[in-house]
Structures are given as C-alpha cells and as structure tokens.
Image (tube, rainbow, N blue to C red):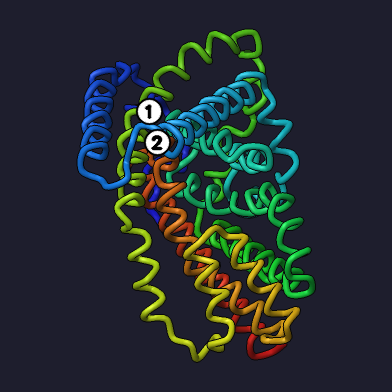
Amino acid sequence: MVKDSASAKKMTPGRYGKKRRRPYRALFFSLTITVLLLLYALVAVDGMDQENVVSSLLFPLGRLLLFIFLGLIFGQIIESTGWTKKLAVVAGPMFRYGNLGMRCSAAFTAAFVSGVASNAMLLGYYKDELISRRQLYLANFINQLPAYFLHLPTTFFIVVPLTGRAGLVYFGLTLAATLLRTLLFVLYGHFVLPRDVAISGVEDLGGREGKARLSVVKSIRKKIPGRITTIVVWVLPIYTIVFLLNQLGIFTKANLFLNNYFVTGFVPIEALSVVILSFAAEFTSGFAAAGAMLDAGVITVKQTVIALIVGNIMAFPLRALRHQLPRYIGIFSPRMGTQILLLGQGFRIVSLAVVTVFYYYFC
C-alpha cells in the first residue's frame, strides 16, 4: 500500500493548515494551454470543426465541472453542518474494525449519493491532517462499493433485458469481486493500520463540526473557490488532451492492439465479438451482441458471462483514463490522483479475474 504521511497521533495544523493563495496564475497558464490545444485541433486534426469542439468537448467538460462543483459544495455542507457524525454511524462498525475512523465512514456513506462529494470530504480531512494518506487511499478504494450501487440501476435495467440469465450471473460476479476487495481492504486496515489512527479525534467529530453549523456559507466561500480553481487548472488541459487523443484515434489503436494480442483460448472465437464490442464501442453494444448470440444458440450462458467479464476488464482501464483521470487529478493532485486511479483499477481487475477464474472452473 502507500505509506502514511500523517502521524497516528492527533495531528496539528501543518503545511495544509496555512492559508495559500488561489492559483490564479496557474489558471491563466492552464487556460492558455487549453486554447492553444484547441487551435491546434481545429487546424491540424481532420474532421475537427467548431461544432465538434462544442458538442464533444465543451459541453461534456462543462457538465463535468458542474458536477464536481456541486459535489464540493455538498461535501462542504455535510462537513460544516455536523452531518459527518450522523453519516459515520451507518458504516461505523466496519470502519472501526478497519482502523479507518469515523470520518472515512462518513465519506463512504456520502459516496452512495456523490463520489465527487465523498472524495472532496476525504481530501479535506487529509489536508486538515485529520486522516492519514493511507486512510485516504483505503477509503477511496472501499468507496468502489457504494459507487457500484450508485450506477447499478442504470446498467442493470439495460443489461438484464438484453442478456437474461447471463446478465444476472454477470452482475453477481461483479458484485462478488467488489465485496471481495472491500473485505480485503478492511482486513488490511485492521491488521496494518494503528488503532489510535482510527480513534484519534473521534470524540470531537460532532462537537467541532456542530459548532460550524452557522458558518456554512462562510466555509463554502472560504474553501470552495480555491478548491474549484485548483481543479479547473488541471481538468481543463488534461480533459482536452484526452479529447484530442481520442480524436486522433489513439484509443482506437490501443483497442486494436489489445484485440490483436488477445488469447482466444479462454474465450471461444464465437464470443470474441462480444469482447470486441464491449471495449471497442459503447458498452451496451457488447450486451446487445451477447443477447443476440444467446438467442441464436451460438454461445452458452457461461461463455457469454466470461466474454462480458473479459470485455469489462479490457475496456475499463482505457475508459477510466478517458473519463476518470481528469476528475481524479483535479480533485486530488496529478500524482495522488493518478496513483489512486491506477491502484484502484488494478485491484478491481485482479478481483474480477479471481472470481471469473473461480466461476470458469467450478460453476
């Protein structure tokens, strides 16, 4: 895992407690780089025009920044109104056992509503030196469980009608993988993290935050502008670079590379199209192809499930880099955000592979 950067004892304000200037100069350079990238795209990239930039870049980017902004405000309201203690009660026993503390528990509960708000809460606690770096990483990894349920209604009612029983098994395996790594993270915290990290500051969790109930607006005005400015500084150029890479066909070439070196021994050649569509196109196309092939009797339920899982494993890293990397880097920092994203997706892929191999040999 990652080494702690904060003491296990009650932490005193350090470099994160100092008032820092908002990075408006960095924002100017970020905007300049972004504009230059867009000008390059309009001049050098075939098929690129103003309409494409507006519909495929500016609107999605604006929507992303809006959701991040709302998530930051939501997290600040939770922190300033004393709701942290109430939210922490929900998953308190699990987080106490994992030596992660009640603040991480509160962020876990908030993740069922907004992943951005949850990550903003964790970052705020870390900057205030109320949780350690290792607690932040573990809590973020565990928050994949509420993230799973947050997106479940959208995907479940698309996938199951298309694939029937195979879709139910697919969701069962992905849920089993999520629960498996959550259990392992909690056990890791229980046996590795010092216990006094979890209980440090718990007694003032409600009192300190409860006193701030009347200063919600003040705290939002004090913290949100600097945080959202920092986020915009990183999100604008990185999101634009990812957009340009996609327009230049880099991700398509990566998909073709994975396809060319994919071993078909684990997945029959008949189901390979399901895998290809699952990671080379929009995600519902893979499930639609799987449903059609199932109905035609070309592949079995088991072959379909394995093909969908393999497609999921191959697709998600690239999609995470395309859609999640700007958000993680913006909320945390380039180094920390990249570490959290890559480690989290690595653990996710390993857990999916484990449950799939078990299903392949024993079911």
Q: Is residue 208 visible?
A: no
Residue 27: quarter of image: top left
Q: Which mark is residue 49?
A: none
Secondary structure under tag 1 reads: helix
* Residue 322 is at least partly visible in this image: yes
- In the rendered image, residue 162, in percent from the top left (x then y), is placed at 74, 66
Residue plotted at (71% across, 46% down): 91
Picture quadrant of residue 255: bottom left
Q: Are marks 1 and 2 in contact (CB under 8 Å)?
A: yes
Badge 2 marks a residue whose secondary structure is: helix
Give 252 or 180, whichever is nearer the viewer: 252
Above or below, comparing residue 247 to residue 362 in the picture? above
Expressed as whole percent of the image width and height from the top left, the position of residue 85 reads 69, 31
Which quadrant does the N terminus fall into?
A: bottom left
Q: Is residue 58 left or right of residue 47?
A: right
Q: Earlier in the sequence, mark 1 or mark 2?
A: 1
Residue drawn 64% across and 90% down? 361
Find disc 1 in the rendering and name its residue.
232
Tag 1: residue type?
Val
Position of residue 14 relative to residue 262, above or below, is above
Query: So how many labels did they put on this image?
Result: 2
Residue 178: percent from left, percent from top: 63, 62
Residue under the image location 68 percent in, 42 percent down: 112
Q: Is residue 350 left or right of residue 21?
A: right
Foreground of the two, 302 or 202: 302
Name above or below for residue 47 compared with residue 305.
Answer: above
Please give the residue where the numbered disc 2 appears in the rendered image. Answer: 330
Q: Say few, some or many: other residues with alpha carbon within 10 Å of mark 2 (under 14 / 14 to 19 / 20 or more).
A: many
